[in-house]
Image (cartoon, helix red, strand yellow):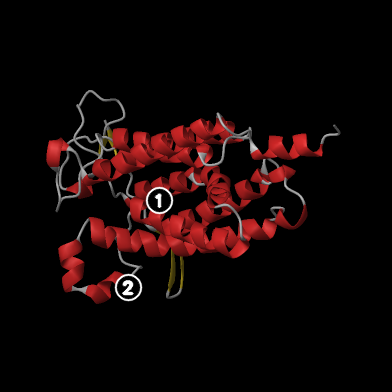
């Protein structure tokens, strides 16, 4: 049985300015996205697009900026609507207080989708192409966020068997019983493992939408599993069928990911990959 180490959430204090570890994990997430996005430019089909439609580093930077806006706005609105709708309807001005606790991944995802739709429209790019570009660069940011959750000692797990070697006591949770370190589980599953699987899958050219579909399905499955070890929100508890709000929000993701992947696969039966078409048209007859 392990004891949660009391970690000061403030990484650096410069007079009245406090730099929190959680803020640094966000910076790490954005930096990793930029690094991976630039690497992604070397992968097909993006490396094979030339001319006015070619992908550049500026595209990655613009996507990052829009994604940050989408994560913050969508994450905050998602938390307010999914987890505490009655409270925030009574206190609407507090919705704007983004510096206070309360962010939802699923809301942040919807915010990023809206941001990518705007980017695709403004650059006249296929939206699924944009989504496929972004998807493999996301899990490392999720992993960084889970590190921040662990440092803050928040989102701890459900009670675990005293025999579990890595069971951890979060004394500030109000109990001295060991719990599952669910932040670590999520870091490993929806962060590290999802990144490895998705990055390898995306290195080869896929049908438009299949990489994004793999992300939706993979995250939904891993998060659904992790929720069995994570303590449900105190004000919600477990909902219908003994599932948490996080699990219920994952079901549409899993269904959407599976449906999108199958749709793209069926489209492959009647049309070759776009890049293959370009090559065949350019070949001498």
Q: Nearer the viewer, residue 75 or 279?
A: 279
Which quarter of the picture shows residue 187? top left
Disc number at residue 96?
2
Classify 121 as above or below 156. Answer: below
Q: Quadrant of the N terminus?
A: top left
Q: Position of residue 55 (x, y in %)?
A: 69, 53
Q: Residues within 10 Å of mark 1 (few under 14, many from 20)?
A: many
Q: Position of residue 191 (x, y in %)?
A: 45, 40
Q: Nearer the viewer, residue 196 or 160?
A: 196
- Disc 2 versus disc 1: distance between alpha carbons? 22 Å
Which residue in the protein does label 1 denote? 148
Q: Earlier in the sequence, mark 2 or mark 1?
A: 2
Direction front: furthest residue: 285
Q: Position of residue 281 (x, y in %)?
A: 77, 38
Q: Dot 2 lies on which element?
A: helix
Q: Does residue 16 appear in this view? A: yes
Which quarter of the picture shows residue 207? top right
Q: Residue at x 31, y 66 (%)?
A: 100
Q: Residue at x 19, y 38 (%)?
A: 243
Classify 225 as above or below 129. Answer: above
């Amino acid at each position: 049985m392990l004891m949660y180490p009391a970690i000061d959430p403030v990484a650096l204090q410069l007079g009245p300015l406090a730099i929190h570890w959680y803020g640094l994990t966000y910076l790490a997430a954005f930096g990793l996205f930029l690094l991976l996005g630039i690497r992604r430019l070397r992968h097909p089909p993006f490396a094979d697009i030339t001319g006015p439609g070619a992908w550049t580093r500026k595209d990655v930077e613009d996507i990052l900026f829009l994604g940050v806006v989408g994560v913050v706005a969508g994450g905050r609105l998602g938390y307010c609507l999914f987890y505490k709708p009655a409270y925030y309807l009574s206190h609407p001005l507090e919705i704007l207080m983004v510096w206070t606790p309360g962010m939802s991944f699923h809301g942040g995802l919807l915010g990023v989708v809206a941001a990518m739709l705007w980017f695709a429209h403004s650059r006249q790019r296929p939206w699924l192409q944009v989504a496929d570009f972004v998807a493999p660069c996301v899990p490392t940011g999720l992993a960084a966020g889970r590190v921040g959750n662990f440092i803050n000692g928040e989102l701890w797990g459900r009670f675990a068997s005293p025999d579990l070697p890595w069971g951890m006591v979060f004394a500030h949770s109000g109990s001295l019983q060991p719990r599952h370190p669910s932040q670590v589980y999520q870091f490993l599953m929806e962060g590290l493992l999802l990144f490895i699987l998705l990055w390898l899958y995306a290195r080869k050219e896929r049908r438009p939408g299949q990489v994004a579909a793999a992300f939706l399905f993979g995250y939904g499955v891993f998060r659904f599993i992790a929720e069995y070890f994570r303590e449900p929100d105190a004000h919600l508890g477990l909902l219908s069928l003994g599932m948490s709000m996080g699990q219920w929000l994952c079901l549409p993701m899993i269904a959407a990911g599976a449906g999108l992947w199958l749709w793209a696969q069926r489209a492959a039966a009647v049309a070759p990959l776009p890049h293959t078409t370009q090559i065949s048209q350019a070949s001498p007859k």
